[in-house]
Image: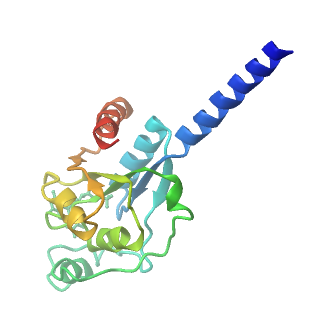
Amino acid sequence: MKKLLSVLMLVCAVFTNARADDNKILVAYFSATGNTKAVASTLATAINADLFEIVPEQPYTSEDLNWQNNQSRTSIEMGDKSSRPAIASKIEDISQYNIVFVGSPIWWGREPSIMDTFIESYDFTGKTIIPFVTSGSSDIGDYGANLQSLTPNVKVLTGKRFPNNVTSEELKTWADEQMQKGL
Ligand SMILES: Cc1cc2nc3c(=O)[nH]c(=O)nc-3n(C[C@H](O)[C@H](O)[C@H](O)COP(=O)(O)O)c2cc1C
């Protein structure tokens, strides 16, 4: 009987830990044309994380994304560091996560303004934020430092830029290394 109880307790402990581990990583992303979305969902599957899409209240049209027009919506937003485009989607319970991967395209060499809205929308105290981006060619640059300045008491890593054809294995290897740094 004693033996059976010990086995049952062990099974319960393993089950509880597995559930706690399963629920602690979030991959949150914004994607206007699908590149970051593809990388984010591959990453989330590779590391068994939850996936959350940052959905703009006002979707970006192709005219909005026209960087050659200095009067387009993105040109105006990105020219104003205080711009905070509204987000329509909401994370139900941020407290369950202790690692949050945050992904988006690079716009004008930095994070799209909607990422600033996102960072300021939640209390990330005690969590680690790990950025990742896609871009035409620009590197991640000051992306992590910019997010850090908006959430000073939180650990924000430098992060990494990925090409659109990055593999699941490459993402997992990178994410595991980052999580070691972050914990
Ligand atoms: C308004 C705007 C500005 C951009 N600025 C840059 C840039 O500075 N450097 C770069 O390499 N790519 C730039 N790009 C290209 C995007 O970063 C790239 O296509 C990215 O993969 C798009 O991601 P998404 O499909 O998830 O929206 C820009 C694209 C847009 C629409």
Residue displayed at 31% across by 68% down: 115
Residue 165, percent from left and from top: 30, 39
Give 49 or 105, whichever is nearer the viewer.
49
Quarter holding residue 71: bottom left
Q: Residue furthest front?
A: 2
Q: Position of residue 160 (x, y in %)?
A: 22, 46
Q: Nearer the viewer, residue 5 or 42?
A: 5
- Residue drawn at the location 41% of the way across and 67% of the way down: 123
Q: Quadrant of the N terminus?
A: top right
Residue 4 percent coordinates (x, y):
81, 16
Q: How is the image coloured?
A: rainbow
The residue located at (25%, 44%) in the rendering is 162
Could you tell me which residue is drawn at 26 percent across and 82 percent down? Answer: 83
What percent of the width, then of the height, locates residue 40?
A: 39, 49
Q: Is residue 29 left or right of residue 7?
A: left
Q: Quadrant of ligand 1?
A: bottom left
